Image (cartoon, grey):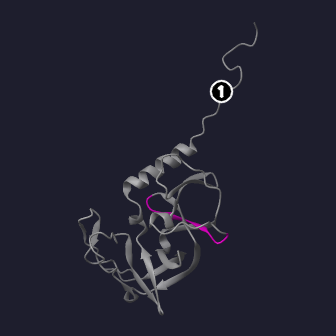
Amino acid sequence: MATTTMDRQTSATGGPVRSDVRQQGGKYLTFKLAGEEYGVEILKVREINGLMNITAVPQMPPYMKGVINLRGKVLPAIDLRMRFGLPVAEYTDQTCIIVVDVGQEIGILVDTVSEVLDIAADDIDQAPMLGVAVDTSFILGLGKVGDAVKILLDIDQVLSVVELNSAAVAAASAQTVTEPPEYGAGTSGDS
């Protein structure tokens, strides 16, 4: 597995600029969003689930759909389509939640999961510079697979630290259950 160093600087938009993209070959879980293929490093993936009940949390950005209860663990759920500014689509039976570890576990909603690909470092190119107005800091690279190009995401950069903290607070507050006091608690019942 070849890795080159990654030098981060700050762009005019405040996001990091990659002068030497980490061209890391390895296994990537690929999925679709609005007809395009994306991939995340398989080591970041904890599990893949079908669509499940999402509990909305007030005052979250629109792409933070809410929280999910995954076997007793409450996790934030982020609609990756909305996060990237893609057109909103109805959820289908193909919609999946990929649980990824970005320092904390979060669920990302995607249109459909495709496959796990082994992409060699030589087949990963740096994302093209699209100007100062376009932030590409979350793109790890572009994986060439046959005639197709997969957009490889640096999932740690998809959400800012502030957004992750908001998601963690939302998940923690949703997990805290306040039980109502028992009827008559604190009274003797005898008058």
Vertical comparison of 104 with 33: above or below: above
**Which residue lies under the disc numbered 1?**
181
Write the residue at 65% across / 27% down: 181
Few, some or many C-alpha atoms within 10 Å of disc 1 (few <14, some 14-19, many ≥20)? few
State yes or no: residue 120 in magenta. no
Q: Is residue 151 left or right of residue 76?
A: left
Residue lying farthest to the bottom in this orientation: 146
Name which quarter of the figure residue 65 lies in: bottom right
Q: Nearer the viewer, residue 140 or 24?
A: 140
Write the residue at 28% across / 76% down: 5
The amino acid pointed to by label 1 is Pro
Residue lying farthest to the front in this orientation: 87
Residue bounds of the magenta highlight: 93-103
Q: Secondary structure at mark 1?
A: loop
Name which quarter of the figure residue 163 lies in: bottom left
Where residue 13 appears, as percent x and y from the top left, is 27, 64
Q: Nearer the viewer, residue 62 or 73?
A: 62
Write the residue at 68% across / 20% down: 185
Vertical comparison of 28 with 161: above or below: below
Q: Nearer the viewer, residue 82 or 45?
A: 82
Vertical comparison of 114 with 52: above or below: below
